[in-house]
Image (cartoon, helix red, strand yellow):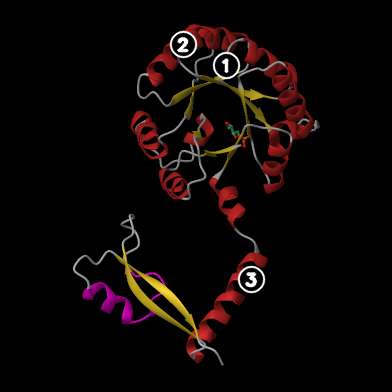
Amino acid sequence: MQIFLDTANVEEIKEAVSWGCVSGATTNPKIMSYEKPGYSFEEKIKKIIQIVKNPVSVEVTAEDFEGMVNEAEEYASWDENIVIKIPMGKEGLKAVNILEKEGIKTNVTAIMAVNQAILAALSGASYASIFYGRVCDLGYDAFEVIKKTTELFRLHQVPTKIIVGSIRTLLDINRAFLAGADIVTVPFKFLKMMTENLQTEATVKEFNNVWKEMRETGAIRLEPKERVFSTPLRKVPFGSEPQGRRQDVVQKTQHPKHSRTSLSFVKK
Ligand code: E4P
């Protein structure tokens, strides 16, 4: 089970990758059009690759197989993590067949039906992208399309990984995974929404208010101690006093990396 990010926005990618739950990214010509105009395509893709350090899908726009192969070979030469998105169709399948034999990974895109996914797999594609929202737009049940495809692939031990894109709601993400998708590629807006829940926020606030009260009334005492963290991100001692004492603790040590807190509960 993996999540990819369905965006070309560097700031969104940086933020999402820092959460540690993103294993790749996907782009397409429309996604590229959301970026501030006038940028270099190659530079943008290279920047994304540098941040993601995992598979990044880049789509070809040629409509004949020779053109697709030429475009694909150029993009693939930019970095080994580039996966070439090839539109489903006769020309696309020919291109996939050639590219995979050359060792270039492909992602057959815009798949709306099980039979298209079967062809993508048989042509040797590394990934097959089923478009959840667009399948539903056609009046079909995307859940069933994904479920049947994943069942078939597992039954026949097909190595092609199923990516589900065209996500329109949070429920689409859950249902895509429940149907057996290997990967769901998610726009940043939805990834952010996945972290949020009003009841979670209210619960954390409630717990922190109790903690604050315990500290203010002296029901609990925190004693900062020396501690070395490997990450340079935490520059203040964990659990030390909110004001003043943090600085004191850092300044007191020769190697002021961090400090640890031991907890003493005061019996009433
Ligand atoms: C991902 O690989 C697709 O290109 C993308 O999710 C398509 O989304 P859309 O149907 O919203 O254009």
Q: Does the magenta run of residues contain 250? A: yes
Tell me the element at label 2. Answer: helix
User: Foreground residue, 212 or 106?
Assistant: 212
Q: Give percent across and percent down for residue 110.
A: 63, 25
- The residue shown at (70%, 37%) is 176
Tell me the element at label 3. Answer: helix
Quadrant housing the C terminus: bottom right
Which amino acid type corresponds to the residue marked 2 in the rendered image?
A: Val
Tell me the element at label 1. Answer: loop
Asked whether mark 2 lies closer than 8 Å to ligand 1, one says: no
Q: Give percent across and percent down for residue 103.
A: 45, 13
Asked if the residue at tag 2 contacts the one at tag 3, i.e. Cβ–Cβ closer than 8 Å, the answer is no
Q: Which residue has dot 1 on it?
A: 125
- First in sequence, mark 3 or 2: give its number: 2
Q: Which one is closest to the eye, mark 3 or mark 2? A: 3
Q: Give percent across and percent down for residue 91.
A: 58, 9
Q: CA distance from mark 2 to mark 1?
A: 14 Å
Which amino acid type corresponds to the residue marked 3 in the rendered image?
A: Thr
- The residue shown at (27%, 64%) is 257
Q: What's drawn in magenta, residue-wise?
A: 236-252
- The residue shown at (41%, 48%) is 11
| Vertical position of residue 115 compared to residue 15: above or below | above
| Vertical position of residue 202 compared to residue 21: above or below | below
Q: Which residue has dot 3 on it?
A: 203
User: Foreground residue, 109 or 263?
Assistant: 263
User: Foreground residue, 137 or 167?
Assistant: 167
